[in-house]
Image (spheres, rainbow, N blue to C red):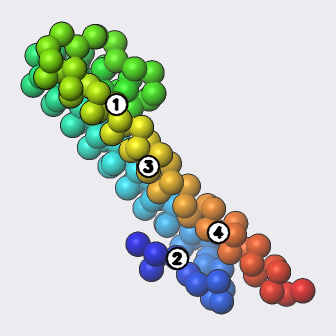
Amino acid sequence: MFAMFEHRSQPLISRQAYLGRLARSGGIGVLLIGASLAIGMIGYRAFEHLAWIDAFLNAAMLLGGMGPVNAPATDAGKLFAGAYALYCGLIVILAAGIVLAPAVHRALHRFHLEQGNR
């Protein structure tokens, strides 16, 4: 993963390469959130027997940090909802890191290049 970024001794990559890197990271973030949404939907469907649209709503609300809409009724559903809520908190942080990494790296790399010219 770290091989995708240039070393501080290397020159700054072109704008086109940077935009490609940004798009790649954004795509990985979208896939991660999409897979997490699918896991939540399947879990709510299996453990709480919710309709697909309600399972989507609950999973999306948890991923967005708002909490579930339908309170779980079964013990298995409660265990799933708790575990999924913890998972969602970590996934959102991970996805944000993946999406923002190229921009932060470029800013720091540019800062180091400017410091080297002094």
Question: Would you say the residues marked 3 and 2 are in contact, meaning their CB atoms lie under 8 Å apart?
Answer: no
Q: Secondary structure at mark 3?
A: helix
The residue wearing badge 1 is 85
- In the drawing, does residue 50 fall left or right of residue 69? left
Q: Nearer the viewer, residue 116 or 17?
A: 116
Residue at x 45% of width, y 27% of height: 65
Query: Mark 1 and mark 4 in contact (Cβ < 8 Å)?
Result: no
**Looking at the image, is 96 positioned above or below residue 78?**
below
Mark identifier at residue 5: 2
Residue 97: image location, x then y, percent = 51, 54
Residue 91, image quadrant: top left
Cα distance in 3D space between marks 3 and 2: 18 Å
Marks 2 and 4, the one that precedes in the sequence: 2
Q: Which of the marked residues, 3 or 1, is nearer the chain's N terminus?
A: 1
**Do the residues bearing badges 3 and 1 touch, measured as CB atoms within 8 Å?**
no
Q: Residue at x 61, y 61 (%)?
A: 103
Residue under pointer 3:
95
Seen at 85% across and 87% down, the residue is 117
Tag 4 residue:
106
Mark 4 or mark 1: whose residue is earlier in sequence: 1
- Which mark is nearer the camera, 4 or 3? 3
Picture coordinates of residue 55 (x, y %)?
22, 21
| Amino acid identity at mark 2 | Phe
Compared to residue 92, the image places residue 13 above or below, namely below
Provide the secondary structure element on which disc 1 rests: helix
Marks 1 & 2, CB-CB < 8 Å contact: no
Q: First in sequence: mark 3 or mark 2?
A: 2
